[in-house]
Amino acid sequence: MIVTFVSQCEKKSLSRTRRILDAFANRIGNNVWQTAITEDGLKTVKQLLRKSATKSTAVSCHRNKTRQLTELVWIVGNKRRFNDVGIVPVNWTRRNLLHREWENEWTSLESMQIIATIAALLHDIGKSTIGFQKKLFHSTFQGDPYRHEWVSLKLFIWLITDCQTDEQWLTRVQDLPDYLSSNTITPKILQQDTEQAKIDQLPPLAGWVAWLIVTHHRLPPIDKYFFNERTDDLRLLKTNHRDLKRNQSSYYQKKIKAHDYWVKNPKSVKEMSATEQENFWQFDELVIYSSLWQRKLKRWAKKAIIHPQLKQLSQQAIEHKQAISDPFLLHLSRLCLMIGDHNYSSLDANDRRRVQGSDDFKNKLAANTDQHTKAIKQALDEHLIGVSEFTAHFCRALPAIHQGLPRLTGHDPLVKNTAHKRFKWQNKAFKQAYEYRELSEDHGFFGVNMTSTGGGKTIGNARIMYALADPQKGARITVALGLRVLTLQTGQSFRNDLQLNASQLAVLVGGSAQKQLFELNQNVANNNTLDVNTNNEIDTSSDYQSSYESVIYESVYGSESANSLVDEWVDSEIDIADYEELGLGTVIESRKAQELLFAPVVVCTIDHLIQASEGKRAGKHIAPILRLLSSDLILDEPDDFDHKNLPALSRLIHLAGLFGARVMLSSATLPPDLLQGLFEAYLAGRQLFNAQLQKPTPKVICGWFDENSCTVTPCTNNDDFKHYHRNFVTERTLYLRKQPIRRQANILTLALTYQKEQHIAFYEAVATALLQ
């Protein structure tokens, strides 16, 4: 191909760029080069430019598309030097740094920001106890009898004792010094009803803050933390509809208590002496006496009092005698708090983003300690103030994540019609989906692809989702599969068939060992030996493993929030520097999480994505939620999961609807009851999303696709979906009956007898028979 390079570099980067481009192309102007080059050669040029890039670098590459047209291939460096199609601007205007137009639909954004920030200022006040401070400097692997978030909750409830309205408690925390001067906290007061929280008795906004405080590490269980499947406990829980359908007020009243292994460690309670346990309720110093912290809390409490929507939410909750229970508000405000906590906890001592706490509390109370020197890493009041600032900043960034992250645009392999006879159904499906792209933006999309095995579902799904996206903005797609080897194969197929490079596509699997196993199977490992324990499943995302690591980190260093957001291996080459203008680098610290979030297309195993709704602790749900909030979702082979997995799958689909994503389910064998249940979950989530963003009542755009036909139509309720799906299945059944039989099976006799004493010989005989 013939390409043209245009340089808008400045200072020293100009000479560096010229040396690189002179080696590959002919200079036809001071800052313009042209040459004929291969695809591999062009990749090499881009890699060399990226390695030497600075803030002054700006190089665009254009290729000749036809005799009369050129198209932009990529830009390395400062993208603001070019427009969307690579043209150098001749007139300048100020940049839109705030992107307030993204916030127009987010009517609850400021409400979430205020409440999440107040909760951030209060979330770790329970770390002031003598017991917690002692364990930070005397390493122990014994957990707290009651976790610090439970103590923080009890402290918050004491602070607002006797406040009957939201205005009363917000006024009190504005004048906190006066209240503290006449009221003293004692262990006896805190330990009244130790096992109970009584959040249901708090004013509505206070209940919201209390929920965030006590859940900022782990969500509470519905009844117990652990269940034994062999007992009746789990069976009774699944059939107890009253528990599962409780409203938020009833849940606060009946279910929020100090459950074992949630906020209570029964082993520590049993083994610790009474004096040691008492230390976790006593204080030598209390962070709420920090003057700087009090000023920050006063500022945000004042904002809450005068904010009209918070007044309205409080009034509505009182009128209906219910707690604030909108999942959209609760999910995202908790997410903001957890990200603020995680990222501020991970800052180094000399990081410029660190804030100042009160000088009086610098060496009195610690939030966490350095794992190498065991010295105070962050003072407690500094930590609370810093987390509140990060939380407020990230909450403002939610519209940017939802609207402004990198997308895939102008990608010809996804638009161009295929000439292959077996895959021609994709062309019709693409056109049908494109007609409904605007409606799907406001009403959502729920697709079903039941094309036969080998019919091109994987590429077809990507093309359909690309057609639904705004062609000017582009598409963001997440593909989730059940098997890790298939995940790598799908990623490889996308790169080969759709020509997606590592800067457009990220592949996420369980760990580096999975990548090595895949390379061995593909004969890429060059005869290197790989030591793998085949007796154990490789599962770095295991909730038990992350739970264990979190307990150790919390016990030794005092900061469970410092754990990694993403442990898995991420195959990506996203240049984060290209997107610095979004301002997310200050709140998303993890490099792997950034690569996962910024990639336009992600192929991953569902065990990673499912943590968006199933993660209990250690922040492992943060990256999946951010991904789900910013992209559409394709679930490949969801019927592979058994009945035990279906509730979790339904929650994931509901969350996708709640965050405004489009969803595609893809398998040749999708049972109607599975689809009906998942559609109900999606519709319920989409209704909540539309209500929050002032969109019309959703008439979900539903699509059915196979190699025979495709149907796209709005569905307003479950009956509509059931009717159209029955018609589609009837038509598909008639089509399949006309197809020639490709395979026939014979049941062969296996004359073997199993004996427990000789089970190894039996399995060897079975293997031999199967091979024959």
Image: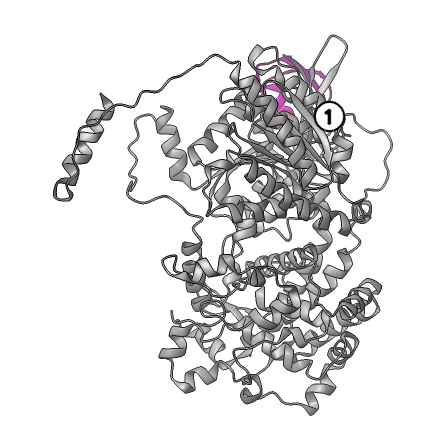
Whether 144 is drawn above or below 45: the answer is below
- Asked if 525 appears above or below 217 in the picture, the reply is above
Q: Position of residue 664 (x, y in %)?
A: 61, 34
Q: Is residue 551 left or right of residue 587?
A: left
Of the pair 496 and 414, the residue shown nearer to us: 414
Badge 1 density bin: few <14, some 14–19, many ≥20, Cα 10 Å: many
- The answer to whether residue 385 is seen in the rendering is no
Q: Which residues are magenta?
A: 16-42
- Residue 28 magenta-highlighted: yes
Q: Nearer the viewer, residue 8 or 71?
A: 71
- Amino acid carrying label 1: it is Tyr
Closer to the camera in the image, 487 or 319:
319
- Residue at the outermost bottom position: 182
Q: Can residue 378 be found in the magenta stretch?
A: no
Would residue 577 be found to the left or right of residue 753 on screen?
right
Q: Which residue is mark 1?
A: 434
Element under label 1? helix
Q: Residue furthest top?
A: 67
Q: Is 541 drawn above or below residue 725 in the view shown?
A: below
User: Residue 706's image quarter?
Assistant: top right
Image spot of residue 649 (x, y percent): 54, 45
The answer to whether residue 255 shows anywhere in this view is: yes
- Label count reads 1
Q: Quadrant of the C terminus?
A: top left
Left or right: 645 with respect to 721?
left
Image quadrant holding the N terminus, namely: top right
Q: Is residue 432 left or right of residue 303?
A: left
- Residue 751 point in image, percent of width and height: 18, 28
| Residue at (49, 80) in percent of width and height | 280
